[in-house]
Amino acid sequence: FIPSALLTYRAKVDAKGKKDAQTQLQQAKDDETKASALAGGNDGIDLVRRIVKQARAHLEPQGVLIVEVGDGRAAVERAFPDLPLTWLATSAGDDMVFAARAEDLPNANLHSAK
């Protein structure tokens, strides 16, 4: 025989344990998001630089690169002042996604691009 008070206590502990696990999982996801955001460098677009530098080698000659940069438009335009970019209208605004033609992208040697 197990007293109902003990069963109630155990249920509360189990529910709390589950909630704690969910909270820890969410915290880990949040930490990962923060870490990847911080890995963007001083202006937040280091990954965009790598993508632009290497994209031409992966695209067909008439291909188009499309990149979502969130609120990084100003940083992208400073980083690539000579690259013709087309900013695409999205439901979130018209300054978060750009397109660039493969022929306008820089040439890069895949083995030396890092």
Image (cartoon, rainbow, N blue to C red):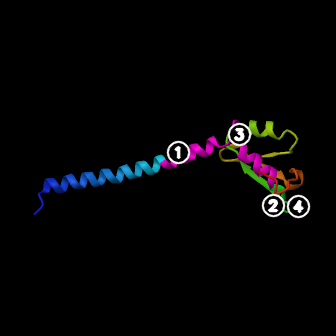
Task: Report how far apart the C-alphas of labels 1 and 4 lie in the structure.
Answer: 39 Å
Magenta part, dominant SS: helix
Q: What whole-number distance in Å separates the C-alpha atoms at marks 3 and 2?
A: 23 Å
Disc 1 to disc 3, how far (Cα)? 21 Å
Q: List the residue tagged with mark 2.
A: 58
Q: Are marks 3 and 4 in contact (CB under 8 Å)?
A: no
Foreground: disc 1 or disc 3:
1
Residue under label 4: 61
Category of crowding for the residue at label 1, using alpha-carbon neighbours closer than 10 angstroms: few (below 14), some (14–19), many (at least 20): few
Mark 1 or mark 4: whose residue is earlier in sequence: 1
Q: Secondary structure at mark 1?
A: helix
Residue 23 is marked as none
Where residue 113 appears, x then y in whole percent? 80, 52
Where does residue 28 sit, x and y in percent of width and height?
Answer: 49, 48
| Relative to 17, 99 lies left or right | right
Give the magenta part as a residue range.
28-54
What amino acid is labelled 1 in the image? Asp
Residue at left 25%, top 51%? 12
Gap in angstroms between the C-alphas marked 2 and 1:
31 Å
Q: Which residue is mark 1?
A: 31
- Within 10 Å of disc 2 (Cα), the crowding (few <14, some 14-19, many 20+) is few
Mark 3 touches mark 2? (CB < 8 Å): no
Q: CA distance from mark 3 to mark 4?
A: 27 Å
Mark 3 sits on what residue? 72
Q: Secondary structure at mark 3?
A: loop
